Amino acid sequence: MSDRTIAISGASGKTGFRIAEELMAYGDRPRLLVRSSSVIPNTLMKAEHVRLSLQDPNALDSALKGVDALVIATGARPSIDLLGPMRVDAWGVRSQVESCLRVGVSRVILVSSLCAGRWRHPLNLFGLILVWKRIGEQALENSGLDWTVIRPGGLSEREETLEEEGVYWSGPDQQESNSIPRRLVARCCLEALNTPASIGRILEVTSSASQPITSLPDALMSIDR
Ligand SMILES: NC(=O)c1ccc[n+]([C@@H]2O[C@H](COP(=O)([O-])OP(=O)(O)OC[C@H]3O[C@@H](n4cnc5c(N)ncnc54)[C@H](OP(=O)(O)O)[C@@H]3O)[C@@H](O)[C@H]2O)c1
């Protein structure tokens, strides 16, 4: 149990809402940062939420004031707008980081992606998304904040049999395929928040039933930077 207020941006997304649910189950108070058109799932209706644009620094500052940490789960939704990844995954992350610096939020977790930074990858057909994701990561890494980047593999909606499934944690640029259910990514974010040794680390995560269940503190003892 804890007594933290944690902001989650992109909390209307399929990973974001699970992060908020996991934080609530743990005893944190989530503050959902969503845009004006976002749909919030029923399970989170009672959670505090703030509607804003990532391009509005004043709105971001007042939404982030007083929180103990921010989890960034925004990401451009697939569309014909090929500038979405640049706007959301690079500049949107950067504006959230700048706001944290202004209002004194020091702990930030960013949900990024395996292969962030790669130029040659089929996912880049959507607006060079992996390139822009790395630029977002770098804005956070260079900020001086207490950051952790979680890079998941392909995301799934599966909620069954997760208790028996282990997460394969690795350092950067070690994994390039495999998948992980969004619920486990949400739990990885919570574990990172609770693990000070994850500060300053890029952690890639995938999962499978054959992977032994390992806590993040244990995994960190054998992960290269
Ligand atoms: N799909 C995969 O297999 C995969 C693999 C690895 C990593 N990832 C990354 O993991 C993260 C979570 O993915 P997901 O599929 O769970 O997310 P998602 O369901 O697509 O949700 C994206 C979230 O970002 C918000 N968002 C999008 N554009 C925005 C904007 N211009 N301003 C503010 N908020 C905006 C969305 O708000 P609305 O609800 O208002 O649209 C939503 O809350 C993303 O960064 C994604 O790129 C995905």
Image (cartoon, helix red, strand yellow):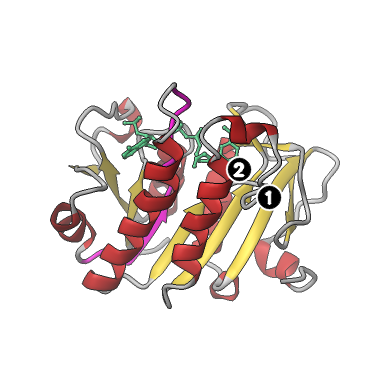
Point out residue 158 in the picture as x, y percentages from the top left corner: 62, 26
Residue 114 in the image: above or below residue 102? above
- Number of numbered discs: 2
Q: Quadrant of residue 201?
A: bottom right
- Graded by Cα atoms within 10 Å as few (under 14), some (14 to 19) or many (20 or more), the crowding at tag 2 reads many
Q: Is residue 74 magenta?
A: yes
> Where, quadrant-wise, is the C terminus in this rendering?
bottom right
Q: Residue at x 86, y 41 (%)?
A: 210
Kindly report the secondary structure that dominates the magenta region of the rendered protein. Answer: loop
Taking the image as shown, residue 51 lies to the left or right of residue 211, namely left
From the image, state whether disc 2 or disc 1 is nearer to you: 1
Q: In the current view of this chain or complex, which residue is farthest to the bottom?
A: 144
The percent position of residue 167, horizontal first and vertical second, equals 72, 49
Q: Of marks 2 and 1, which one's residue comes earlier in the chain? A: 2
Residue topped by disc 1 = 205
| Residue in front for this viewpoint, 143 or 32 | 143
Q: Is residue 104 above or below residue 50?
A: below
Is any part of residue 128 visible from this angle?
Answer: yes
158 to 72, vertically: above or below: above
Residue in the image at 21% along x and 55% along y: 60
Give the secondary structure at mark 1. strand
Q: Position of residue 150 (x, y in %)?
A: 58, 55
* Foreground of the two, 171 or 18: 171
Q: Which residues are magenta?
A: 66-79
Q: Quadrant of the N terminus?
A: bottom left
Residue topped by disc 2: 184
Quote the CA–CA distance across marks 2 and 1: 9 Å
